[in-house]
Image (cartoon, rainbow, N blue to C red):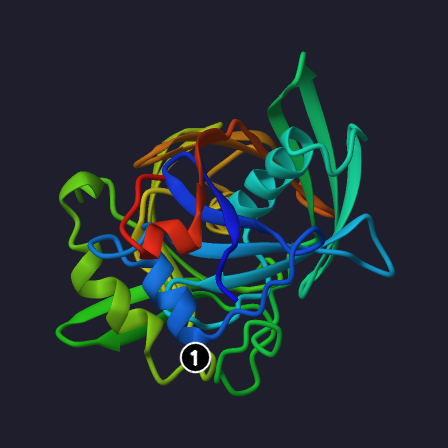
């Protein structure tokens, strides 16, 4: 049975196929996910999110990367999921708890009429231990300014877990982020032997004490226009390195801007807008009919 309805949403260009797994029975296999996410022959997306019922929260996020792998958490994805829930009438609460593989996340929705506008997520507290990433760095607690080599290049890496692994690299002031070869170095770092479960990779430049620019290579997806957990990890790492003042940080991504708030301890908050693109029917889509 593949007569599924779906919606396409994005957060700063980080795009997802959203499906209601409460009102319809959805059982996805790896081929379904890869085919749906394919940008040439499928719907096109960085990932698939199925809204499920939860015994411990308002809803559960069932999230898959474009390569069919399961991911623990997705910051932009959970914001898109929240808008989907609101606009499909699955809930009319302006505050929600959503269960993820990285724990329960609290959401606050700024509502304008029937539209869920700015969405703020309590992403939880970051973790810095090598074990939590995980990273194969013997005897290490926090991993900041740790030098590794991949190919012909050496990088000083800074590791942060936001429920999923992040390797944050601060580019030198003379390096051009716009021209940086993310597609070359991203996959090499993602698959570096240091990371037994692979890692997301963020390349950042400091703009001032309250803002950064970021480009990202997502584990299991590739280069994307935005990454919510990556924005959080990058802001946190830059604050830890003393490059940013703790507080509300503007993170400029290839697809737009999000805001990350962290005081230097405790929970991290991610906020920003989302875009509703279109609704469709998967069976009709596969038969070649109009969406």
Res 267 visible? yes
Going by the image, does 175 lie left or right of 3? left
Quadrant of the image occupied by residue 100: bottom right
- Judge whether 27 appears above or below 22 on screen: below
Going by the image, does 139 lie left or right of 234? right
Quadrant of the image occupied by residue 112: top right
Residue closest to the eye, 47 or 264: 47
- Residue extending farthest to the top is 113
Q: In the image, residue 290 lies at what x, y percent?
A: 31, 39
Mark 1: secondary structure = loop
- Judge whether 195 appears above or below 279 on screen: below
Which quadrant: the C terminus? Answer: top left
Quadrant of the image occupied by residue 253: top left
Q: Give the residue displayed 33% in from the left and 77% down from the top.
A: 191
Q: In the image, residue 8 lies at what x, y percent?
A: 44, 41
- Judge whether 97 appears above or below 145 on screen: above
Going by the image, does 33 lie left or right of 52? left
Residue closest to the eye, 136 or 72: 72
Q: Give the residue displayed 60% in from the left and 37% down from the top.
A: 84
Q: Give the residue displayed 38% in from the left and 50% down from the top.
A: 284
Q: Give the residue displayed 41% in from the left and 68% down from the top.
A: 32
Q: In the image, residue 228 lies at what x, y percent?
A: 50, 45
Q: How many marks?
A: 1
- Residue extending farthest to the right is 56
In the rendered image, which residue does mark 1 sit on? 195
Residue closest to the eye, 238 or 203: 203
Going by the image, does 163 lie left or right of 215? right
Res 160 visible? no
Q: In the image, residue 262 lies at what x, y percent?
A: 64, 39
| Label 1 Cα crowd, 10 Å radius (few <14 / some 14-19 / many 20+) | some
């Amino acid at each position: 049975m593949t007569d599924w309805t779906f919606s396409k949403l994005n957060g700063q260009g980080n795009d997802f196929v959203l499906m209601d797994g409460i009102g319809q029975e959805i059982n996805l296999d790896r081929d379904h996910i890869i085919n749906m996410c394919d940008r040439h022959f499928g719907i096109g997306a960085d990932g698939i999110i199925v809204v499920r019922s939860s015994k411990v929260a308002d809803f559960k996020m069932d999230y898959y990367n474009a390569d069919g792998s399961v991911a623990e958490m997705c910051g932009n994805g959970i914001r898109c999921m929240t808008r989907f829930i609101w606009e499909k009438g699955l809930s009319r609460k302006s505050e929600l708890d959503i269960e993820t593989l990285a724990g329960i996340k609290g959401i606050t929705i700024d509502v304008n009429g029937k539209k869920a506008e700015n969405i703020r997520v309590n992403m939880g507290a970051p973790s810095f231990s090598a074990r939590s990433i995980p990273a194969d760095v013997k005897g290490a607690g926090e991993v900041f300014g740790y030098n590794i080599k991949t190919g012909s290049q050496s990088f000083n890496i800074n590791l942060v877990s936001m429920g999923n692994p992040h390797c944050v690299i601060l580019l030198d002031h003379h390096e051009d982020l716009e021209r940086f070869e993310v597609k070359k170095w991203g996959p090499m770092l993602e698959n570096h032997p240091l990371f037994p479960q692979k890692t997301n990779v963020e390349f950042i430049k400091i703009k001032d004490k309250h803002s950064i620019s970021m480009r990202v290579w997502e584990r299991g997806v590739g280069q994307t226009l935005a990454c919510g957990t990556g924005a959080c990890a990058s802001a946190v790492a830059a604050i830890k390195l003393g490059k940013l003042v703790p507080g509300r940080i503007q993170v400029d991504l290839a697809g737009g801007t999000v805001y990350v708030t962290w005081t230097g301890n405790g929970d991290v908050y991610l906020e920003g807008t989302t875009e509703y693109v279109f609704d469709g029917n998967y069976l009709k889509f596969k038969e070649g009919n109009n969406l």
